[in-house]
Each structure stands twice: as C-alpha cells, then as structure tokens.
Amino acid sequence: MPCYQLDEELWFPPVEAAEDFGLLAVGGDLSPERLLLAYSLGIFPWYNPGEQILWWSPDPRCVLFPSQLHISRSLKKSLRRSPFRISFDEHFGGVVYWCRRTRSASDGSGTWITQEMQQAYLELHRLGFAHSVECWEGDQLVGGIYGVCLGRCFFGESMFSRRTNASKVALVHLVQHLEMLGFELLDCQQTTDHLLSMGAEEISRRDFLEHLRSAEVPPYGPMVSRFASRELVG
C-alpha cells in the first residue's frame, strides 16, 4: 500500500489505504480543522520529534466500551480508600505536560508529544474539543488522562501516573462518566496489556468506523462537545 503525502488542502485518503501496520499519510499540519477531520475519520497523529507528521488508522483498533470496564480487586480497594481528589478539565495543560514528561527519556527525547502537539491539543481544549481528568494529592497533580471528544466517542490520547494507580483511577472515573452520558466508546488507539486488563478489546477498523457512525461522530465541521465538565470527589 502507498503512504500518501498530504499538502495544504484539508483532506485524507481513505483509511482502507493504510499500510498493514496502520500508517496512512505523512505531512499536513496540526490545525484544529485537520485534527477534527482526522478523528472523525478514525485517524490520529503519532510521530517522533524531527519527523514529518505521521497519520495512522490501525487495524485492529483498541477500544473500551464503557459498560465493559473491568476494575480489579486491588483497584477497587484503592478506589474505596479515595486516595485522590478527581477533577475534570481543571488543569488540562498540566496533564499534557506530565504525559509528555513521564514518557520522555532522561535527555528529554523519545516522546511523541512534541511541543507542536502540546500546542495543538491546548488549542483543541480552548475550543472545547479536548478534555482531561485529573488526580490530585493535595495540590499536586499526580495522575491523569486527556483526549478528544466528538459525538459520543472519546478519543484517548495519553495518560500518566506519578503515584500507584493514579492513571487507572483517572481512567475509571473517565469511563464511568462517559457511561453516565451515554457514550458509545473510548478509543484507546494502541493496544497495551494495561488497557486490556481494564476491559479494552480489539475490533476491526471496519467495526470501529461503524461505531463512530453509531456514536454520531460528525464527518466534519463546527461541533459542540458533549463532554460535561464537572468535579467529582474520588
């Protein structure tokens, strides 16, 4: 399969044209318009510093249906102890910062959350499309997750933890919040043992696109986020 080179026009090739491991296109930009178009088509950016922007649509796709969330016995104990204060959209920039920092090598390299990516998602947050869940220990941000919301789908981008179970606690609160709002699914993008242990599963790209349509993800254009921002006490 060819890998498509994007230009200044706002377009993407059909996702069925992606290479076997999911790479679909290179280039383009991280403007809000292009990012929202990408997510609505089941595409997301993921690349290393110094590279062109790489756009992916893997098959299979890792997703978590809110009703299928699995909470282990040990995590249930942690949730009952309520070690963290949970908030929504209280410090989006801090969550992105710590996701970048905790995934960086000691020399600051090796993370896909580039400065350009940080600024792009901060802009999506300002526009009401990107959201975060935070775990606090006192006044310290110790865990969290952020992503993009379109229709009834939350596209998870990254999470971090500075305390045991902090990212898992944030994920649990996010998924429970999404279920309460009637969301169809949480897109996990990449498969990990951590996500599978919490109820995520792999589905085909075709099924994933069907779920996007079922979740009322609009094909493109000005959209209003359905993610209700509110604080919860965990």
Image (tube, grey):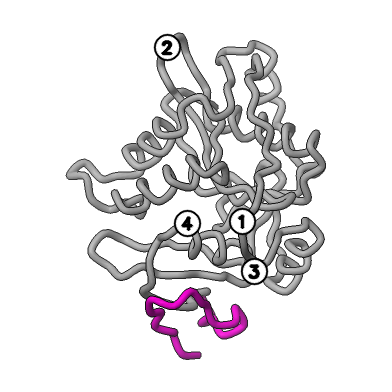
Q: Which mark is residue 139?
A: 2
Q: Secondary structure at mark 1?
A: loop
Q: Which residues are magenta?
A: 1-21
Q: State how far apart marks 4 and 1 are (Cα).
A: 10 Å
Does the magenta segment cover residue 77? Answer: no
Which kind of residue does numbered mark 2 sit on? Asp
Which is nearer the N-term, disc 2 or disc 1?
2
Q: Is residue 28 above or below residue 64?
A: below
* Mark closest to the chain's N terminus, 4 or 1: 4
Residue 204 location (% of width, % of height): 71, 70
Would you name the residue on which mark 3 appears?
60
> In terms of image quadrants, where is residue 87?
top right
Give how far across and how far down residue 214 sits, in percent: 81, 61
Report the residue marked by disc 4.
32
Q: Of the residues shown, which amino acid type is indicated by label 1?
A: Pro
Disc nearest the viewer among 3 and 2: 2
Q: Name the residue tied to disc 1.
A: 222
- Residue at 38 percent across and 79 percent down: it is 7
Looking at the image, tell me whether mark 3 or mark 1 is earlier in sequence order: 3
Work out how far the residue at label 3 is from the one at label 1, CA to CA, in angstroms.
29 Å
Q: Are marks 2 and 4 in contact (CB under 8 Å)?
A: no
Residue at mark 4 to residue at mark 3: CA–CA distance: 26 Å
- Residue at left offset 28%, top offset 68%: 51
Residue 67, by quadrant, is: top right
